[in-house]
Image (spheres, rainbow, N blue to C red):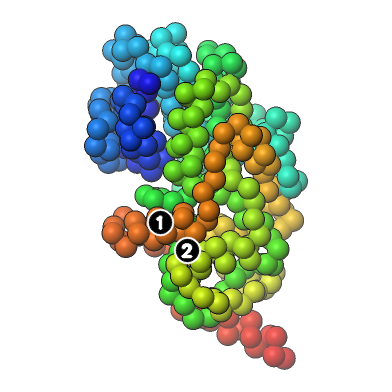
Amino acid sequence: MRILILGGTRFLGRALARLAVEQGHEVTCAARGVSGAVPAGARLVPVDRDDPDALVPLAGDGFDAVVDVARQVSHARHALAALADHVGHWSFVSTISVYADNTTPDQTAVDAPVLAAAPPDVDGPVGPDHRWYGECKVSIEQAVRQRVGVDRSFICRAGLIVGVEDPSDRFPYWVRRLAAGGEILAPGRPTDSVQFVDVADLASWLLHAAGTRLGGTYDGVGPAMTRADFLAGVAAGLDVADPALTWVDQDFLASHDVREWSGERALPLWVRLPESGGLMTRDARPALAAGLAVRPLSDTVRATASWMAAQPDAVRQGGLDPADEAAVLREWQAVRDR
Ligand SMILES: NC(=O)c1ccc[n+]([C@@H]2O[C@H](COP(=O)([O-])OP(=O)(O)OC[C@H]3O[C@@H](n4cnc5c(N)ncnc54)[C@H](OP(=O)(O)O)[C@@H]3O)[C@@H](O)[C@H]2O)c1
């Protein structure tokens, strides 16, 4: 295939470009090139998508497939205007942040309610909390379906993407924490759900979708697993035997200012239940039936740990600080011993 990646200079786009080159495809990436370089074997066409006509010169290149990771509505609209009539298949990487209901577990992409589209004066996510991110992705999904048609477009609503070159502090936190050993604070209950998708599996599925001209809207998530299985899988990938997990009740954590999901004082991949019970329980069966192949967690852990060791400066440090974790565990112990 001749494939055009609108992106390709970081994380998912770069993993996709790398895999596409490995599979023998002819790969062009259109990006500014400020986030990083494209992988060896891929061609970078330097463009700034703030320029509405930036992609027009690529219209005659005869691409079989486009994959867009846009977050800005105008970027996506201009790409569609320039290229939609000239390519065979269009994939858009969306997000499960498009969903309106994060509470109800086990929702499926086909009938789960989504947010309203972004208002006309909002073009992209705003501020540190990425306000309007989901709404902008809804707007882009609608534009893709309208301009390309549902049969030729693949809308892939990714869940948490993990693995090599992960720019977040989420999955790497648990790799680092299990590797460090000692008493480990495990949040919530062992049976709580954890869900994510390996970046390489997602890249592989995007290529499969382009190659088979898959149409439709899917969640790009692996099957949910329990947190006990998740932590055991991380330990297995690191060859850590019998990690010393101490399970701490979610209300106790909240009352000690331990935060959810990501960032300072947060325990990644942990959300409060039942309020956020829909976030990590999405129905993965349609994606698996449509070609998503999921590698064992231990493989994801090994690849992530190798990347973290090779490029320590690229890994964002975050989550609960070791001293804070120890303090919370001491207080939890004191409460339990009372
Ligand atoms: N990470 C997660 O857990 C997660 C979860 C759900 C969904 N997603 C979605 O998954 C996708 C992740 O994509 P990703 O990792 O490849 O990259 P990304 O973080 O979305 O990066 C954006 C890409 O677009 C390019 N870009 C940004 N501004 C540009 C401009 N003005 N002109 C031209 N190019 C521009 C960047 O390259 P340059 O800066 O070099 O130009 C980069 O390659 C996104 O669609 C995200 O919304 C992520």
User: Is 241 on the left or on the right of 304, as rendered?
Assistant: right
Residue 237, which numbered label? 2
Identity of the residue drawn at 44% across and 8% down = 85
Vertical comparison of 126 with 264: above or below? above
Name the element at disc 2: helix
Name the amino acid type tagged 1: Thr
- The quadrant in which the N terminus is found is top left
Vertical comparison of 238 with 246: above or below? above
**Residue 265 screen position, x and y as percent:** 51, 66
- Ligand 1 has an atom within 8 Å of the beta carbon of the residue at disc 1: no
- In this orientation, which residue lies closer to the viewer: 85 or 300? 300
* Distance of label 2 from label 1 (alpha carbons): 10 Å
User: Is 153 on the left or on the right of 116, as rendered?
Assistant: left
**Quadrant position of residue 216:** top right
- In this orientation, which residue lies closer to the viewer: 68 or 332? 68
User: Is residue 334 at least partly visible in the picture?
Assistant: yes
Name the element at disc 1: helix
Residue 304, which numbered label? 1
Vertical comparison of 102 with 17: above or below? below
